[in-house]
Amino acid sequence: QEQQSILLESASRFPPQKGVKLSYGTAGFRADASVLSAAVFRVGILAALRSLKTQSVTGVMITASHNQVSDNGVKIVDPSGGMLTQEWEPFADALVNAVDAEELVRLVIAFQEKEKIAFARTQSAEILLGRDTRPSGDFLLEAAKQGINSIVGAVASDMGILTTPQLHWMVQMRNKGKMASESDYYEQLSSSFRCLLDLIPKEATTYKIEKNLVVDGANGVGGEKLEFLKKSLNDLVIEVRNSGKKDEGILNDGVGADFVQKEKVAPRGFGPDDIGTRCASLDGDADRLVYFCLKSKNGNEIDLIDGDKILSLFALFIKEQLSILNKEENEEKNGYHVTLGVVQTAYANGASTDYLKKQGLEVVFTPTGVKYLHEKASHYDIGIYFEANGHGTILLSESFTNLLEVKNNELASIAKGSEQHRAALRLLALSKLINQAVGDALSGLLLVEAIFQHMGWSIQVWMDLYHDLPSKQLKVKVADRKSIVTANAETVVIRPSGLQEAINSETAKFPHGRAFVRPSGTEDVVRVYAEATTQEAADSLANSVAQRVA
Ligand code: 16G
Ligand code: ZN
């Protein structure tokens, strides 16, 4: 009763915008920031309910990632540190689209009964709040706080301006009972990075590693945080551009990983002077990372190193460590077989998939969206997942990490300092460096740099692992994008009938042609992807498929 009146009173202060219908989508609710207050308030309520239900810490992140600066968005971090459980998404939609405070209260009470969630002053739910650097973040954060405070027994902890992966990491660490402050995050990253560098094989490398790296911070939170993190890194000189400082430019405007990956050009602030330098780009909330290299003297053309190629680098390194570790081991005797899996989506360049399979790796596919890839990767002892757009990470199962700890202790007493021991130590350091809650551009960047120094590679060697097939992406506006239904990890269309046959017949016209279509989860469009052996062929295939969709 007390709960109902508190809720009713506060909800009436956040009336929803008329005519705006939102959907939780692949990555939470996103829209123009001016229409989001009510949605964020309600997501605050939901995050509190999730925390009460699970008796664990949850999170609310306010960001619209790579979208333009006037947009914003909100998503919930589940107790595991990952995305909100899919079972609760329909409720998120219902709650956010409730027409008034009365309907909202009815929905909350009904859901609370269904999920058997108790409200009581003595209950304690804690919700960590984070936001990116968008100017609208301030007032939206206030709306989230008020939503949380309207649930009896829930408390909001404002963690300030953070990258999305930092907040996910904090929630995960808190629920594991570990140190979880922002400075703990930096300490864990920089110490495990240092540890990997200390374990680099002594043999002289053929190539003298360029220790300078230039990073495009998308004029967002990632640039700001990297400026701070880099101070604790010896042996790596990072120059941050588009760091978000005043006058450096606008968030995501001609900068950032999404721009670089989609347009395949250098971001603002990069030019001919950077030819030959290793460059990287983060997206607006620093959960995506791509690398690139400028190509031409008179333009902004680049060689792109996307998520697929970052994944390949990680996979090679891990495979090498596992084989060192297993060298003198008899798996049978040991009774433990390590499963290593690679997870991609249909957007992965066909050349990358071929390459990975040729390395003897197991490659599986899921639909687009972090929640699908992450789930699939968690089935392996070591699961590596990446989207071509640069979002990805590595998951190490608890049993495998425990096994590593045991092995490390064993080897420390019988073969301290051996290559085998060092391989165990490297994998342990990797498990601490990589953010196992979600893809993290800062942690990913440090792992790339550590592996780079380990391998003694030039950027050219990395680029030449395999060569991307030319590809083309298009968007098509349709009346109802949900009328397109796909299966097999979005590689085939099952509705409307006839469309897949049409795509097949277009694709058959091109050698090594591949094409698929899917409704976007974040924009009101259908996306078309095509690849073929030449750019002209890929463009032409994409165009003809787009015509069949329209
Ligand atoms: C979101 C997803 C990303 C996906 C993208 C696809 C999360 C956290 N992010 O940004 O993984 O690649 O959507 O967008 O899941 P689309 O559906 O508009 O193509
Ligand atoms: Zn992002």
Image (cartoon, helix red, strand yellow):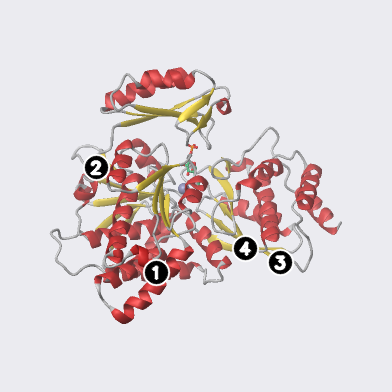
Please name the residue that numbered disc 4 is placed on: 57
In this picture, residue 372 sits left or right of residue 410: right
Local secondary structure at mark 2: loop
Cβ atoms at labels 2 and 3 below 8 Å apart = no
**Residue 29: x %, y % from top left:** 59, 43
Q: Earlier in the sequence, mark 3 or mark 4?
A: 4
Please name the residue that numbered disc 3 is placed on: 124
Please name the residue that numbered disc 2 is placed on: 466
Q: Residues within 10 Å of mark 1 (few under 14, many from 20)?
A: some
The answer to whether the beta carbon of the residue marked 1 is less than 8 Å from any atom of ligand 1 is no
Please name the residue that numbered disc 1 is placed on: 404
Q: Earlier in the sequence, mark 4 or mark 2?
A: 4
Q: What type is the residue that disc 2 sits on?
A: Tyr
In this picture, residue 410 sits left or right of residue 368: left
- Residue 340 visible? The answer is yes
Residue sitting nearer the eye, 313 or 399: 399
Which mark's residue is nearer the viewer, 1 or 2?
Answer: 1
* The furthest residue to the front: 333
In the figure, 99 relative to 425: above or below?
above
- Mark 1 → mark 2, Cα distance in angstroms: 32 Å
Cβ atoms at labels 1 and 2 below 8 Å apart = no
Residue at the spot 86% in from the left edge and 56% down from the top edge: 1
In the figure, 527 relative to 547: above or below?
below
Q: What type is the residue that disc 3 sits on?
A: Ser
